[in-house]
Image (tube, rainbow, N blue to C red):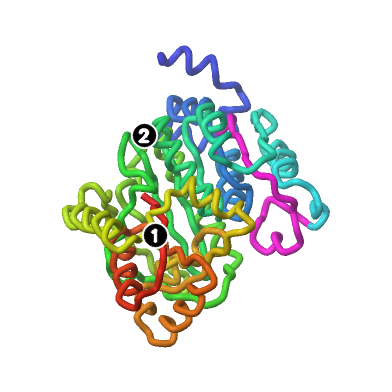
Amino acid sequence: MNQKHILDKLTKDDYQRYAKHLILPEIQLIGQRRLQTAKILFIGAGGLASATLLYLVSSGLKNIGIVDDDIIELSNLQRQILYNETNIGSYKVDVAKRQLMKINSTSNITTHKCKLYGNNAEELIKLYDIVVDSTDNFQARFILSKVCKKLHKTHIYGAIGSFAGQISVFNYQGGLSYHEMYLPNKKQSTPGCSQEGVISVLPGLIGIMQATEIIKIITGAGKVLHEKMLAYNALQTSFKVLRLHPIQQQGEQIEIYDTRLETKNKQNIDIIEICQFYDYLNNNELSICLIDIRPDYEYQLSHLQNAISIPLISICEENIISSISIVAIQKQVIIYCNSIVRTHVASNLLQKQNIMHSILNMA
C-alpha cells in the first residue's frame, strides 16, 4: 500500500481522532489504516468484550462482528460496562452496537443474535480476520478453536474467574491452538476458589490486554503473546507468563496416549468424542455425571455445562472415591481434562477402585 493511497483513506477527522496513534513510530499512517480495515469477530458480549470493544472502537477498528444471544440482566452491570440500568431486558448485541456507534459513528458493527455452534461456526468465522474469545462457554471455546485452526484465523483467548485471569494468542501464524494446549504440571499463581464469582474490575483488565494484543497483531508492533499464557492474580498483584506446549510435541504425552488406547481395549474404558457427548446430553434417558478433574482455578475460568469439579489431587481421597462409587451405580461417570496426562492418571485411579467410567476426549 503506497503512502498516497493511505492519505486518501484518512479523513481530516481521522487525523484529529487518531493523532496520538499517528505519531507513534510503531503505528503511524500504515498501522492506523490497517486498524481501520481489519475484521474482528467477538464471541460473547459480556464483561471481557465490554472493555475490549470500547478500546478497539476508540482505536479505529471499524469492521466488527458480535455473536451473542443473551439478554442484559441486573447482575451483569457489576462488570459489563457497556450496559446500564435502562438496558435491562434488551439483547446485549443490540445495546452494544448502539453504544459503540456513539463512540465512533463510522464503525461498521454487525450483530449475530445467536450462539456459536458447530453448524454455524465456519460461516461466521470465515468472514473475519481475528476471533476474540469473550465467552465463558467451554463448548463454544473448543468449537471456535478448531474452526480457527481449520480456517487459519487468529484466536485471542481470555478467561476470568474470582480474582484471576488469563490471556493468550492462539493459532497465530499457524502456531499452537487452544484445543492443542498442554499446560505444564506446575503449581500456578492463581489460588483455588470454591465459590463462583468474579471481582468487577477483572474483566476490564483482561479485556484491555486482549485489545492490546489485537492492536499489536494488526499493526505489527511489538511481540505477540503466542505459545505463552499470561496469568494475572489480583489478590497477589502478580503477573506470570507460562510457556505452552502442544500435546503432539510431548514425547511423554504420545506414549501415554498410546497406553490409554490400549487400556480402552483391555479394561473396556470408553473414549467419548465431543460430538458424541453432545448426543448424550440430548438423550433424556441417559443419566450422566460429568467430572472436571482440572485444578479449581481452571474450572472457575471455564467448564462444560453441568460439570462438577473434582480436581485430580482430590480423587484419591477416600470420601471422594466413595462418593463417585455410589454415583457410578446410578449414572454414567465421564471424566475430562485438557491434559491427557491428568486424564490417564485419574482413569487409572478409578480403575483400581473398580469404578466404571468413560473418558471425554478433549483433544
Q: Position of residue 271 (x, y in %)?
A: 38, 54
Q: Residue furthest bottom?
A: 318
Dot 2 falls on a residue whose secondary structure is loop
Dot 1 falls on a residue whose secondary structure is strand
Q: Nearer the viewer, residue 171 or 319?
A: 319
Earlier-in-chain disc, 2 versus 1:
2
Q: CA distance from mark 2 to mark 1?
A: 42 Å
Q: Is residue 325 above or below residue 2?
A: below
Q: Is residue 336 left or right of residue 10?
A: left
Give the number of the disc on residue 359.
1
Q: Which residue is mark 2?
A: 220
What segment carries the magenta color? 59-84
Q: Amino acid at mark 1?
A: Ile
Closer to the observer: label 2 or label 1? 1
Is the C-beta separation of discs 2 and 1 under 8 Å?
Answer: no
Quadrant, the N terminus: top left
Q: Amino acid at mark 2?
A: Gly
Q: Nearer the viewer, residue 101 or 20?
A: 101
Residue 25 seen in this snapshot: no
Q: Is residue 248 above or below residue 318?
A: above
Residue 21 seen in this snapshot: yes
Mark 1 residue crowding within 10 angstroms, few (<14) / some (14–19) / many (20+):
many
Q: Is residue 250 left or right of residue 97?
A: left
> How many numbered tags mark residues here?
2
Q: Nearer the viewer, residue 98 or 273?
A: 273
Q: Residue at x 62, y 39 (%)?
A: 66
Q: Is residue 118 magenta?
A: no
Q: Position of residue 55 (x, y in %)?
A: 57, 45
Q: Position of residue 342 (x, y in %)?
A: 31, 65
Q: Position of residue 106 (x, y in %)?
A: 66, 28
Mark 2 residue crowding within 10 angstroms, few (<14) / some (14–19) / many (20+):
some
